[in-house]
Amino acid sequence: RSHGVRAQGGPIRITASSVESRFPEGALFKLEAQSSSPIVEVVLTYQIAGRSVTAFAYPTFEKGASIRAQHLLRTAGAAGTEGGTNYQPPGTEMVYSYRLRDEAGNTLETSPERFLYMDPRFTWRELTGGGGLIQVFYYGPIQSRAQTILKAMEETQARMGTVLGARLARPVRIVIYNNIRDMGAALPFVSQTTRSGLITEGQASFEQRVVLVLAEDPFVRGVASHEFTHILLYEAAAPVGGRLPSWMHEGVAEYGNLESSGEYERALREGIRQNALLPLRALGGRPGTPEEVILFYGQSRSVVAYLIDRYSSQKFRDLLGAFKETPVLEAALQRVYGFDLEGLDRQWRESVGAPPPPTPMPRPSPTAGVPPTLPPLGFQPTATPTAVAAGEARTPTPGAPVASPTPEGRRGGGLACGRAEGPFALDAGWLLVLAAPVLYGAWRGPKGVRRLFRRPWRRGR
């Protein structure tokens, strides 16, 4: 895709500029320029739309009065590569500009341009809704399915946007893949290696505002609404939405799910009956066994529903507001509701007829400050759902892009259902989000799987 780059005047002139999607490897930036003196430096400045982090790269070229420079911005996660912190899903919008300098000391800075990174294997069509804030991209003969997904997103925006007080500042892009084979190359590398027996049905990348959805899934409305709710929650708690504990992220996402699995509710009832509920404080991250994962989602949704339905959505919005001021959930709960995490656990258990939680070990009183970053629920570029701490700011050096640290001291995030974070997604644990019902069904035996999906479980390829 070619662009006419607008430049500020001077002896240096841009004669051609373009960006080409080389999915899944990355985006290829090309620039041609001329000057009365040999051009000795070209710096590419780029940024993911909506992020505060700016990165730099040095395109390769031969010095001279007329140059042709190019740089491949790699998007970690491409098939056959190792994961990294620069994973970008299809649907990511990039903002870029150039700075050039010649031997005589003349400089030129171009105006910012935008590029939408997409998967060029397909001819994409677009549907728009939600007041222009929801963009659905699809290919092939699935327009009716794309419309179903768009409608689910609009319903979720209307309902959960109000509950959370989330106002989208820019569009969310939903990129629909027709089948597992097509979608595989778009997933983070870690996800590809982890999902040997699983199918990734959806992934949310927070900062890019991108949701990947598998169209052939029979529960696609639920998948789409769950992933979109992750982004709404992240937006409502910005800029610290990625620091919310897993139980809140997944509980809110399931609360917003238009087709939530009945297995979660059944697992919750069984956990209550057997006095096997997990302490709420232990749900800051996902548990490790299949049965606990299913219970985790059922319990998380129930706790969130208790806070919203018992105390009102306004109180929940106040909780998010307090968390934004002091990103320590314990302090925010105490300030808004008058109880801490153990107090919430006791009240919720009483409301569902469960025995009280075990007595917690003594711990320091909560203090304001920045807590340790928990593994994200789903996206990010690293595209793994784990948060990546930003390094110190460094002066750009030839050959390697350097990103400035974010204000939160970490890279952005996302979820696969889960959440992705890397520079833009969540950790591998997110695969369990939508795979959880399957794991639970497998734990219950073959009949459990067939009951859940009414079809044989398929392995990812």
Image: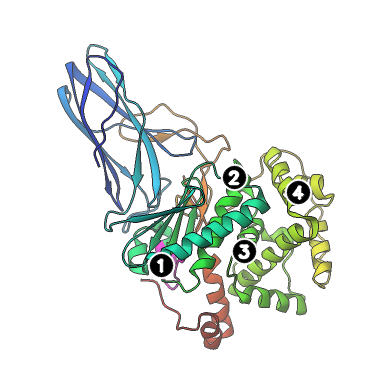
**Separation of marks 1 and 3 at Cα, in angstroms:** 25 Å
> Of the residues shown, which amino acid type is indicated by label 4?
Glu
Please identify, in this view, whether the residue under mark 3 or under mark 2 is nearer the observer: 2
- Overall secondary structure of the magenta section: loop
The residue stretch that appears in magenta: 192-202
Image point (66%, 71%), residue name: 295
What is the CA distance from the residue labelled 1 to the residue labelled 2?
A: 27 Å
Residue type at tag 2? Arg
Report if the CB atoms under discs 2 and 4 are less than 8 Å apart.
no
* Nearest-to-viewer mark from 1 and 4: 1
Q: Earlier in the sequence, mark 3 or mark 2?
A: 2
Q: Is residue 197 magenta?
A: yes
Which residue is located at x 56 percent, y 80 percent? 441
Residue on which disc 4 sits: 330
Q: Which mark is residue 167?
A: 2
Kindly report which numbered mark, 2 or 4, lies closer to the viewer in this rendering.
2
Q: Position of residue 370 (x, y in %)?
A: 66, 40
Vertical side of 104 occupied by 147: above or below: below
Report, in whole angstroms, how far the alpha carbon at label 4 lies from the one at label 3.
22 Å
At label 1, the amino acid type is: Ser
Q: Nearer the viewer, mark 1 or mark 3?
A: 1
Which residue is disc 3 drawn over? Answer: 254
- Image quadrant holding the N terminus, namely top left
**Observer-nearest residue: 380 or 131?**
131
Asked if residue 8 lies left or right of residue 246, the reply is left
Whole-angstrom CA distance, mark 3 to mark 2, is 20 Å
Q: What secondary structure is found at the residue carrying circle 1?
A: helix
Left or right for 334, reference 220: right
Q: Judging from the image, what secondary structure is the residue with disc 2 in?
A: loop
Please state which amino acid type lies under the numbered disc 3: Glu
Q: Earlier in the sequence, mark 4 or mark 3?
A: 3
Q: Which residue is mark 1?
A: 144
